[in-house]
C-alpha cells in the first residue's frame, strides 16, 4: 500500500515539475505562451468557462500522465491520477486528442495504440466527460473492421445537433463516423486517395522529417454541412458533405465520388473552424499559422520561431485561438520546452 501511494505521489510530482506557468507576451509578437512543459503534448481543448485541457500521447515510456488540466500554469492530472494510471483497467492508455464541443462536453480520444505497436484488443475508445462533475459520462468502443490492426484514431469533431462524431484514422487512412445516440460506427473512405498521404517527407524549418501519415487534421464547418480534412503528409485540403457521410444507403463508391478537393494548403497537423467561419491551419514547414477566411482566401497570419510544429487548435468563448507546439520534426536533443500558445485574431 505504501509503495503504491509513493508511486502516485511520484507521478504527481514528476508531472507538476514538467509544466510551468509562462504568461509572458513575446516581444513584437501577437503570441502569448500560457504554459510550457518538458513533456510532449499534442491536443488542446478550452471549455466555455476557460478551462484548458491538454493530452500527452503515448509515444514513449516517458508519459507519466495522459490528460491534464492547466491550472495556474501547471498541468494537473485530469480527472485524477487513477485515470492516468495505465495499470488500472478503466484508465487512459494512449491519448491523442482532447476536444470540448458546443455543449461544453470534454471528449478524449484514446487510440489504444501505445508507441505505434498496434491497437490493443479492446480497440480505440472515445470518452465523454462531464465538466461540471468531472466524471465519465460515456465510453464508445469500436468493433474490428471499423479499426484495423495499425489504426491510429487521431482527431475528432462533434456535431452536437445530430449527435455525430467524426474522426480521422492516420494509421490507415479513413474517416470514422460514430452515431453518439446508438453507438454504431462506420469506417468510410478507407484507403481513398483523399485520406492517404501524398508525400513521404516534409522539410520543416530546414529539418527533413521522413514519415508517411494519412488523414489527420479534421474540421466541421460552422453550419455542420461539410467535413474538411487532410493528410498530415500532404498539401491537399478536402471536404465532403456530412449528409453523404451519415447516409447509410450509399455505397463506398457513391461516397467516394462526393469528395471534393478544396485547395492546396501548407502542410498542417490540426485544423479548426472558428466562430467567424475562418479555417485555421498550421504551417509545419515554415513555423507559421494560417487561415482560410470566410471568402476562401488563404492567408498567413503568423510566422514565428515559437511556432514549432503547431499541433492542435482550440477557441475560447472570447475568440482567442490556442495551439500546442509538439516539435515532432526535431530530434529530441534540439527540442525546447513544449508550449501552449494563445493569440487574438485581428
Image (spheres, rainbow, N blue to C red):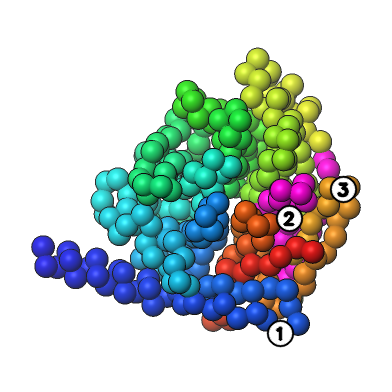
Q: Is residue 191 above or below residue 49?
A: above
- Provide residue 340's location: percent of width, then percent of height: 57, 68
Q: Secondary structure at mark 2?
A: strand
Q: Along the horizontal axis of the image, is 321 left or right of 45?
A: right
* Residue for badge 1: 27
Q: Determine if the magenta segment contains residue 255.
A: no
The magenta region covers 261-288
Q: Of 204 and 48, which appears nearest the observer?
A: 48
Q: Which mark is residue 296?
A: 3
Instruction: Tell me if mark 1 has few (under 14), some (14-19) or many (20+) residues whose alpha carbon lies within 10 angstroms of its own.
Output: few
Mark 3 or 2, nearer chain start: 2
Which residue is rendered at x = 55% and y = 51% of the image? Answer: 48
Q: Secondary structure at mark 1?
A: loop
* Residue for badge 2: 280
Q: Rounded to the nearest whole Å, what is the CA distance between mark 1 and mark 3?
A: 31 Å
Residue 243 in which image quadrant: top right
Amino acid at each position: 500500500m505504501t509503495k503504491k501511494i509513493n508511486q502516485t505521489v511520484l507521478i504527481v510530482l514528476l508531472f507538476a515539475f514538467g509544466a510551468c506557468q509562462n504568461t509572458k507576451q513575446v516581444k513584437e509578437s501577437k503570441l502569448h505562451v500560457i504554459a510550457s512543459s518538458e513533456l510532449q503534448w499534442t491536443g488542446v481543448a478550452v471549455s466555455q468557462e476557460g478551462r484548458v485541457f491538454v493530452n500527452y500521447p503515448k509515444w514513449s515510456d516517458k508519459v507519466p500522465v495522459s490528460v491534464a488540466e492547466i491550472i495556474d500554469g501547471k498541468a494537473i492530472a485530469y480527472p485524477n491520477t487513477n485515470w492516468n494510471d495505465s495499470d488500472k483497467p478503466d484508465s487512459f492508455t494512449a491519448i491523442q486528442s482532447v476536444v470540448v464541443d458546443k455543449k461544453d462536453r470534454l471528449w478524449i480520444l484514446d487510440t489504444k495504440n501505445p508507441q505505434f505497436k498496434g491497437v490493443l484488443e479492446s480497440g480505440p475508445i472515445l470518452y465523454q466527460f462531464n465538466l461540471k462533475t468531472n466524471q465519465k459520462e460515456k465510453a464508445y468502443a469500436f468493433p474490428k473492421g471499423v479499426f484495423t490492426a495499425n489504426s491510429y484514431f487521431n482527431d475528432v469533431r462533434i456535431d452536437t445537433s445530430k449527435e455525430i462524431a467524426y474522426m480521422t484514422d492516420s494509421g490507415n487512412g479513413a474517416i470514422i463516423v460514430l452515431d453518439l445516440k446508438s453507438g454504431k460506427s462506420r469506417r468510410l473512405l478507407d484507403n481513398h486517395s483523399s485520406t492517404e498521404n501524398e508525400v513521404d517527407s516534409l522539410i520543416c524549418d530546414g529539418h527533413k522529417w521522413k514519415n508517411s501519415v494519412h488523414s489527420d487534421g479534421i474540421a466541421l464547418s460552422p453550419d455542420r454541412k461539410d467535413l474538411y480534412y487532410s493528410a498530415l503528409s500532404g498539401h491537399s485540403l478536402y471536404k465532403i458533405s456530412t449528409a453523404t457521410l451519415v447516409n447509410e444507403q450509399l455505397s463506398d463508391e457513391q461516397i467516394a465520388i462526393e469528395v471534393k478537393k478544396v485547395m492546396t494548403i501548407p502542410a498542417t497537423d490540426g485544423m479548426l473552424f472558428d466562430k467567424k467561419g475562418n479555417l485555421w491551419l498550421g504551417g509545419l514547414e515554415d513555423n507559421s499559422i494560417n487561415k482560410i477566411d470566410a471568402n476562401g482566401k488563404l492567408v498567413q497570419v503568423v510566422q514565428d520561431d515559437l511556432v514549432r510544429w503547431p499541433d492542435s487548435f482550440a477557441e475560447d468563448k472570447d475568440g482567442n485561438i490556442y495551439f500546442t507546439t509538439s516539435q515532432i520534426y526535431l530530434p529530441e536533443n534540439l527540442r525546447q520546452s513544449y508550449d501552449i500558445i494563445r493569440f487574438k485574431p485581428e
